[in-house]
Image (cartoon, helix red, strand yellow):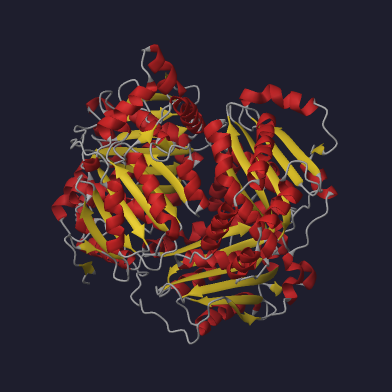
Amino acid sequence: MALGVMKQDAEIIKPRNDKREYRRIVLQNNLQVLLISDAETDKCAASMDVRVGSFSDPEGLEGLAHFLEHMLFYASEKYPQEDSYSKYISEHGGSTNAFTSSEHTNYYFDVNPDSFEEALDRFAQFFIKPLMSADATTREIKAVDSENQKNLLSDVWRMNQLQKHLSLKDHPYHKFSTGNWDTLEVRPKERGLDTRQELLKFYNENYSANLMHLVIYTKDGLYKCESLVRSYFEDIRNTNKNFISFPGQPCDSESLQILVKAVPIKQGHKLKFVWPITPGIRHYNEGPSRYLGHLIGHEGEGSLFYILKKLGWATSLSAGESDWTNEFSFFRVSIDLTDAGQEHFEDIVALLFKYIQLLQQSGPCQWIFDELAAICETSFHYQDKIRPIDYVVNVAINMQFYPPKDWLVGSSLPSKFNSEVIQSALKELSPFNVRIFWESTKFEGLADSKEPWYSTAYSVERLTGSKIEQWADKAPGEDLHLPVPNVFIPTDLSLKTVSEEMTLPVLLRKTPYSRLWYKPDTSFSTPKAYVKIDFNCPFSGSSPESEVLTEIFTRLLMDYLNEYAYDAQVAGLYYSVSNTDFGFQVTVVGYNHKLSILLETVIQRIANFEVKPDRFAVIKELVTKEYQNMKFQQPYQQAMYYCSLILQDQTWPWTEELEVLPHLEVEHLVKFFPLMISRIFLECFAAGNLEPKEAESMIQHIEDVFFEGSNPVSQPLFSSQYMTNRVVKLERGINYFYSTEGLNPSDENSALVHYIQVHQDDFKLNVTLQLFAVIAKQPAFHQLRSVEQLGYITVLMQRNDSGVRGVQFIIQSNVKGPGQIDLRVESFLKVFETKLYEMPSDEFKSNVNALIEMKLEKHKNLREESGFYWREVSDGTFKFDRREREVAALRQLTQKDLIDFFNEYIKVGAPLKKGLSVRVYGSAHSSEYHTDKTQPAESSVVPIEDIFSFRRSRPLYGSFKGGFGHLKL
C-alpha cells in the first residue's frame, strides 16, 4: 500500500484519511516548528518540547528541572500577574499542563480558537522572559514536595526508583528526579546555595531555542499561522548550546545477573525481567523490539503466558521496550504471579528463557513480521482523531528523535524485515545480561537494605547466567510454540452507505426482551463500530455476595476467552465484560469487519457458562487481593469513594464484599449463575459503520440464544423488576460531614471532598452550575494551591450521579487536616463571592462564550461519541440533543441568573445549600480526628455517624428510569 505523503520541503508521511495540512519551518533562532492546520477543529493547541530534563539536574539539587517546569507557569515580564497564563486559558475553554522526563521537558495547552493568538503570546513568554519571584519559588517547592508525598506509597514509583538505585552511581539514570523539600530547600541552604539563583542559572544555561521543538495546531491557514509563530517565538534566545547527551550504559557487570527481592506496599507478587538493550530507535524501520514484544507478550495458544496461565501461575504478562533514550534502553517482561506462581519462581524463569531459546532456534519469521507490519499500517491509516492537546504532545516528542518525514509516524510503521537486526536484539535477551526484580509482601522482614528516596525494603543476590541456563534445560516440558496466523485481521475496510442523515441515536427495535438504540457513523468515515449490550439482572446487585459473584463471573468469562480474543485485540478489535450495579455489560469496539464473530462467541460463552474450579480459585484470589489493596488507595480516592457510598442507594461497601469473599466457593457460583441469568432485560447500543439491519440481526441473534427454545436460559423481566440507580437527597440548609481515619496508617496525607448538591438534570440549572465551575476553577486552584499550598491535588469539578448534579472540591494535603481544609474552602467561597458580584460584564460574556464553545466541540472519534450517547441511555435521560439545548439555555443566561444561583445554592450559609464534607484523616492529623469529632457543632452542621443509617433515613431523588420498561418513544 502506498503511503499518503504530502509535498513539502520535507515529505511528512501522514495517514491516508488525514485532511489536515502540515508545514515544517525553522525560525531564525533555530527553533524547529511544525504547523498543523485543521479547518474542522474546535480547539487549538500547542506543545513545546525542550531538550533538557532531570538527567541534567546539578549534583545535590535533585528535582531542579522538574521544579523549573512548575515555576514557568507563574508569571513573565510581559504578563507579570501571577497565574495569569492559566487564568486566561481556563477562562477561554482551555487547559494547560507540563511534564519532565529524563532528557525532555514538555509544556502544552489547548484553548478555544478565537483566543489562540493571545494564549500563544502568553505561552511564548515561558521561553523568553519568565519571572520567578523569590516568594513564588518558596511556595512552589511545597507543591513539588506534596507531589512527591503522594508518590511515596505508590509501588510504581517505588519500584521504578529501586531499578534506578541499583545502577551505576555516576550515570544520571541513577538519580532521583522528582525533588522534595529536602533536596530543593533544606540541603541547598546548608551548602549556602540559593535555590532561586540555581533555578535562573539552570534556565539560562539550558533553555536555548536550538534545543526546542514546537508544534502548533490551528484552525487558521498555514500562512497566517506561520506569521504568528514568527512574531511570537523569534524572541527566544538561541545560545547554540549543544545537546548534552549521556553516553554509556546505566548498568555495569555488578548490576547484571542479579535477583532483587523487594517488598511492595500492595498485596501480590510481581516478577520483572529487565535487560539493557541497544535502543530500538536506531532500527525503528526494522522494529526489533516490537517484533520481540509481540511474541514474548503474546497470549494465544502456545505462548509463554498461555502456559503460565494454564499452570495457574500467572494472571498477566507484558513485554516490550521502555525507558529508552538515544544512548540506552531496557527491554522488560513483567509477570503478575498467583500465590502458586510465587512458589514456582525457578520454573517461571526457566520457561521464559526456554521461550527465548525457541525464538532463537526458529529464527525471525518473515510472515510474522509482515502480519505485524500490516496491522501497524492499517492502524496508522485508520487511526482515530484524538484531542489536539494530546496530538501536539505526541508529535513534539517525536520531533526530537526522528527525521521530519517520520514526525507523525514515529516508530509505529515497521516496514523492513531484517533477520540480522532481530537476531542481534534477541541475543541481548540473554541470561547473562538480565536483572530480575521480584516483588512480594512475602519478603517482609527478609530484606536487608533500604532504597533512600522511598524507603523500599529490598535485598540483592547474584543469579548467574549459567544457573538460569541449567534451570531452562530442565524446564517443564510444556508445549511452547509460535502463534498461528491471526484470523481477526480485517480485510474489508469499506464504508457502509447510510440512507438518511441520522445525527442522533434512534430507538431501532423494541421487544419485551430488549431495546436497541442505533446511531450510524455520520462524522468519522472510519471502518469501525461500537456495540454495547447491557444485561439488566435484578439478582446480581441484591447483596454483597451477589455483587462479588457477578464480578467473579465476568472475570472468569474474560479469562476463558483470553487466548481466543487476544488475536482480535492485536488486530484492533477490543472487547470487555464488566459488572455493573445491576448486572453486567458486554462492549465490543474496533474494526467492524469481524466484530459480529467476536460478539457471537462472547454471547455463546455466556449462555453456556460453566465454572471451572481451577480458574475459579485463581480469579477469587485475584479479586480478594484487589479488595485488600483498596486500603492503599490515595486518601483523596478514599474520600471520593465514601462520598459515592453516602449518595448512591443500594451500593455495598467493599469491606463487606471482602468479608464474604473467603466463604464463596465454586458451588455458590454454580447455583447463582442460572438464577442471575433467569430474568434479564437487554439495553443495547450499536453505532458506527453498521447498517440498521446488521445491528438488528445482532440483537435478534442474542435474543434467540437466551429466550428461544423449549427450555430457554432466560425469561423477560417482570415490570416490578426493573432496577435503577437512586441518589440520596441531602437536606437544604444543612452541611453534613463524615469523618474517618485513612485506611493506611503509614500514609500521612489527609483528604477532603467538599460536595455541594444542587439539582436533578435541568438544562438551565445544568449550564448555570457548569458556568460557576468554569469561572471558579482557576481561582480555586490559584488560591488553595499556588498561594496557600494546601497540596498538589487541588481540584474543583462538577459531579453527576445518575443525573443529580453538584460541584465538589477535592483536596489532598500533608500540611493541614481535613477539618482545617474545609474552613479554607469556605473562606475561598467568601472571597469568590465578592469577585462574582464585581465581575465586569465582558468577563461574564467571555466565560459564557467559552462554555458555549466547549459544548459545541465535536466528538473526536466513535468511542468518545458513543460514550456520550450511552451515558444518556444508562442515566435514563435520553436527551441526545443535550448539547444544543444547553447551548440555547446558555445564550439566555444573564449575570443576575448566575449571582442568584450562587446565592441560593453555593454561598456559605445559603438557605437552599445542601453540603456534604467527607474528611479522611491521615496519620499526620490523627489527633485532629478526635478533637474535630468532639467539638460542639452549629445546628446547621450535622455529623454522619453511620453511612447506612443515614442513607435509610433520607429521601431519594426519583429515577429518570421510572418508566423503564414502558418508555414511550
Question: Is 851 displayed left or right of 39 in the figure?
Answer: right
Where's residue 206, x and y in %? Answer: 26, 33
What residue is rendered at 58% in x and 28% in y? 814
**The one of 791 and 42 positioned closer to us in this rendering:** 42
Q: Position of residue 18 (x, y in %)?
A: 32, 68
Residue positioned most to the bottom: 499
Q: Quadrant of the C terminus?
A: bottom right
Point 35% across, 76% down: residue? 493
Closer to us: 421 or 150: 150
Q: Quadrant of the N terminus?
A: bottom left
- Identified at 77% across, 72% down, the residue is 718
Given residues 41 and 757, the one toward you in this image is 41
Residue 431, quarter of picture: top left
Residue lying furthest left? 420
Residue 419: name its quadrant: bottom left
| Whether residue 244 is situated above or below residue 457 in the rendered picture | below
Q: Is residue 177 visible?
A: yes
Percent from the top left, x then y, of residue 440?
A: 47, 33
- When asked about the image quadrant of residue 210, the answer is top left
Pick whichever, 630 or 439, lies toward us. 630
Q: Position of residue 424 (x, y in %)?
A: 17, 46
